[in-house]
Image: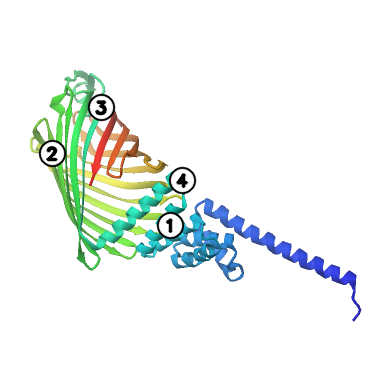
Amino acid sequence: MKFNKAKALGVAAIAAFALQSSATLADELTDKAKALLATGKGADAYQLLEPAETARAGDRDYDFLLGLAALEAGQNTRAVFALERVLAMDPNNTRARAEIARAYLALGETQTAAQEFETVKKQGVPADVTMTIDRYIQAIRRIEDQNATSLTGYVEATMGYDTNVNVGPNKSSVAIPGFGNLPFELSKDSRANEDGFGSIGAGFNLRTPIGGGYMLLAGASANSRGNFSKQQFDTYNGDMNLGISRTAGEDVYTLMGQTGVFYVDDGRFRNYTGITGQWQRNLDARNQVSVFGQYTDLQYPDQDVRDAHRWVGGVSFAHLYREGIMAFSSGYAVGERAQHGHVGWQGFDGFGVRVGGRMNYDSQTVLFGGATYEYRKYVKEDPSFLSKRRDNQFGVSLGATHYVTKEWSVTPQMNLTYNESNTELNEYNRELVSVTVRREF
């Protein structure tokens, strides 16, 4: 058969074009997957990449993206297969080894996960990555400890300054409508008092398995705070809890009973007893959701008109980013009712939101912060102010924890609170700065 050079060149051109188009499509596929992963859409990236696995398995870049997307989508076994192909071609790929360690951890293969994490550390990674890996290893140890009794505790000391140690109004007088809007001068102890303070605290937590996925939980804590000059507002408190939790797959159920006392100036100010229930689910490797509810019985030995029933119920969500950043948010409803009918105006309904997060700053320092808002609408008219009280409370907290060693840490922080109210007596602001030294064991 006579060779047709023109025809051969045409076929070659078509083949080259086909190969180029295939490469372009491949690049578009991985580029799109990268974009999805970068915006936290791991499940969408997995749906995009998975159909091409038969054709592209063995392509290192593709396999890495597939493994990462599978891990984000909760397809942990598929993640292991894809990342193993990457490591077969590139054993020194620390990112792939770190991700496969996470996949093994999600599968419950804790020993294998720990080995992979240790290998990553030995290969040499930045200090912040090392700290993140150490936290994973600590989490693995906690998981392994679930089959054994564990006892943890802490002691801490704090020094700080508080612009409102008694949570009083930031004014010297208020006008009370129920008394003809006459201005009433507030005593020194009734209005906001600022002072420096020091405190010491300690606590412990006990966890012991009782079989069938159940865990017995117990704990106690105590704190004593003394002001430098305003000793009449010194406080002491103690709390205890006892409960049980059950782990079933990705779900954790917890029921906890709690009791505590709070003293002001050596006098018992408040007692409380309550019960808390929570359901927590790990949606995937980076997302967690919880539903919680709480009832508390509040008793004031010297002011029984303040005795109340309190309920709280809500949901929370937490997300872990790849950069070592954890963010959380929660929303809740809250209600409180006086236990004595003649002071029903002290009862309220309301709702609140909380947002916050933490991030690794370096190998020994964690930054954290949060913001809160709570709205409270009281159910009956206050006879002194001739209106139903309404409060809007805002809060902001910022701080950092520096781990001097694994056991010792130093935490400077700032807390700001502002309570806006249509009754002057309940309007206040508070600024608190402190430094805490803590020893965990």
Disc 4 and disc 2: Cα gap in Å? 49 Å
Which badge, 4 or 2, is on the more N-terminal residue?
4
Q: Which residue is mark 2?
A: 270
Q: Which sits earlier in the primary sequence, circle 3 or circle 2?
A: 3
The residue lying toward the viewer, choosing from 399 and 231, is 399
Query: Looking at the image, which residue sits at the far bottom?
Result: 1
Check the image and name the residue furthest to the front.
122
Q: Does 22 sit left or right of 315 as displayed?
A: right
Distance (Cα) linking label 3 and label 1: 47 Å
Q: Earlier in the sequence, mark 1 or mark 4?
A: 1
Q: Nearer the viewer, mark 1 or mark 2?
A: 1
Q: Is 177 situated above or below 314?
A: above
As drawn, the label of residue 119 is 1
If you read the primary sequence from the N terminus, does the residue marked by circle 3 or circle 4 appear first?
4
Marks 3/2: CA distance? 22 Å
Q: Tell me the residue at 23%/18% (across/down).
A: 172
Q: Are marks 3 and 4 in contact (CB under 8 Å)?
A: no
Element type where label 4 sits in the image: loop
Residue under the point 11% across and 30% down: 265
Q: Amino acid at mark 3?
A: Asp
Provide the residue designation for mark 3: 162
Q: Nearer the viewer, mark 3 or mark 1?
A: 1
Circles 4, 2 touching at the beta carbon (< 8 Å) = no
